[in-house]
Image (cartoon, rainbow, N blue to C red):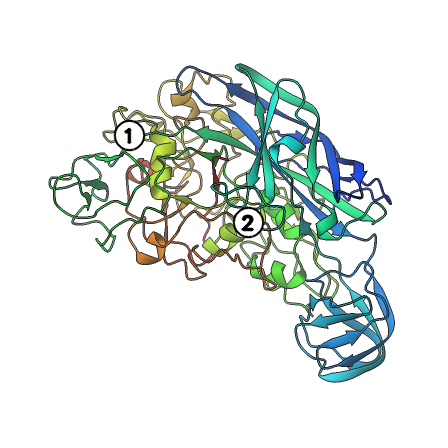
Amino acid sequence: MRLVFRPIVLLGSLLAGQYSSGNNISITQPLLVDFNTAGGTVDARFTVSWQNSWRTSSAPGNWDAAWVFLKFRVGIADPTRTGVSSTGTTLNVGSTALLRVGMPVLRTAGTGAIPANAVITAIPNGTQVMISAAPTTALAGATLRFIRIWEHARLATDASHLAPAGSTIRTGLLNPAAAYNATTNYGVGAFIYRSANGTGTFTANNVELRWNSGPQGIGSTTPVEVCAFAHEMVYVTGGGFRVGDGVSTYRLGAGPNGSYFQVSSEGAIVVGTFPGDLLFQPTDPSDGLGPIPATFPKGFAAFYCMKYELTQQDYAAFLDRLTRVQQALHVGTNLATGVTAVANRYVMSNSATLVNRNGIRCAATVAANDPIDFYCDLNGDGTGNGTADGQWIACNFLSWGDVAAYLDWSGLRPMTELEFEKTCRGGLTVTVLNTYAWGVLSLANAAYTLSNTGQNNQQIATNYSTTAGNAAYNNTTGPSGDVTKGPLRVGTFAGHASNSGRITAGAGYFGAMELSGNVVEITITLGRPQGRAFNGTHGNGILTTAGAHDPTSWPGASALGTGYRGGHYFSPAPELRISDRVNATQGPSTRIRIYGGRGVRTMP
């Protein structure tokens, strides 16, 4: 049995579904108000709230924020057309009302045959659509069904939004370095955060984000569903910092002796052995080549980083808003269109039993071509998304392609390994020798036991360290051969009653959690040409028809150009160090139990 929330749908004043992410951030159902037919806009009104928020003008001089983005779907049911005929890839459908580019096309009756996985590629006029492959048998009097799809809402500029008292809204443009343009450089989401110093639960009531709905074909009477999504982010301030720790066998350093390398700008970095050059250590897995281009994000410029790793709830919600073909690309179980009986498996690990605490499942019997509904079921009772079903556990079994698709879909981007070190360590003068993400050498060393397993308040019951840095790694959550072990709830250490600050919380300098341990941090590497080609392009909210990410500077499906940092729940302690690069060039092209995800975004 599955339990899944479905948004309410109204004509003309629509509303949307509630969604939350991370550690107890929540958004009320957005109400669409103030349609401006002439201007082609509508405002999405909602309240967003999250716990343990802050803004401080003292070190580190930063704040946390909610990254909010909207998805929409046209219609209240899949549209059908009767009496359809075809000429080549052109279909004569009578009316294109409520049809959208990207919709999968199915023949349900009449003469003709539509190729598997065909989708609408263009709508040239009010009576015809074009599809991705011509019918294998021409259509004559056919009945077609068009499966609705979720699309990304394009937002207006900062001044168009309504920020309630005490809050600030900044639009995240597709290209933050360029001027806003409603067509070519629109907002893919928005940051919402405190406008003054403060700590504790932060609530922004009746936020209004302006959506440029008209250019996306949405009028005041168009029936639509809208969903709001949110991630907690931390602001990583701009400025110089050091990379390398002078100790780890695999590390970055400065020529000629391998001491710390100072990042002092976003300019190109020379790789070599002369003083001031960046030096890959002799035993480093990198190719040893350079330079590092000026376009490669280095962490000197300010950016936002996800406070927590992707959760299983995040990933299930993502899967739920893809087409069947796209879904099939992002799980371990065979979900090809035409498959109607899917074993009642944990779909990421493709296992009939729970493996390494990944509880994402789907129904055992599914429609042949329709998208599948996914849910979390950590306790295996067959009832989805219950109070103990692990929605808040970091999502593992993710490949690079899975993480890249999620980041593209949500308007974020991958972080580079230089940005990883900045997020952990902080600014220029911080001591870097041999440290973990929480800034010191101490590390918890006894096996944890858990209480409230799978719940949003899951916690360490025994062996939480009150003096050393807490992290999920082989001494606390291993050994590696135990399939019952796995990642923990995001924010577990910070939420413990005995937490006394950054060290025991296991937090990075700017407040990001679980940078050392839990699941790995997939990063763009300096050590391969495919990584050095990355230019910091953000996701646009749109995936390919097959479900892949499409920014051209991002590494491809092979994962060449990626690696991972920070270790994981089965790692030995040295791999948790900020500067350890033993896996810096070995990106995850397949799904393995230790791989997770986290995204960043350049400061607006």
Q: Residue furthest front?
A: 38
x 47%, y 40%: residue: 600
- Where residue 190 appears, x then y in whole percent? 59, 35
Q: Which disc number belongs to residue 406?
A: 2
Q: Quadrant of residue 475?
A: top left
Asked whether 157 or 350 is in front, the reply is 157
Q: In which quarter of the image is residue 453?
A: top right
Q: Which disc number belongs to residue 435?
A: 1
Does residue 335 lie above or below 111 as drawn? above
- Judge left or right: residue 205 versus residue 170: right
- Where residue 577 appears, x then y in whole percent? 30, 35
Q: Of the residues shown, which amino acid type is indicated by label 2? A: Tyr
Q: Confirm whether residue 459 shows in the render.
A: no
- Where residue 357 appears, x then y in whole percent? 53, 44
Does residue 84 lie above or below 546 as drawn? below
Q: What element carries label 2?
A: helix
Please tell me how crowded label 1 is: few (under 14), some (14-19), or many (20+) other residues with Cα within 10 Å: many
Does residue 102 lie above or below 575 as drawn? below
Q: Quadrant of residue 91?
A: bottom right
- Where residue 338 appears, x then y in whole percent? 69, 70
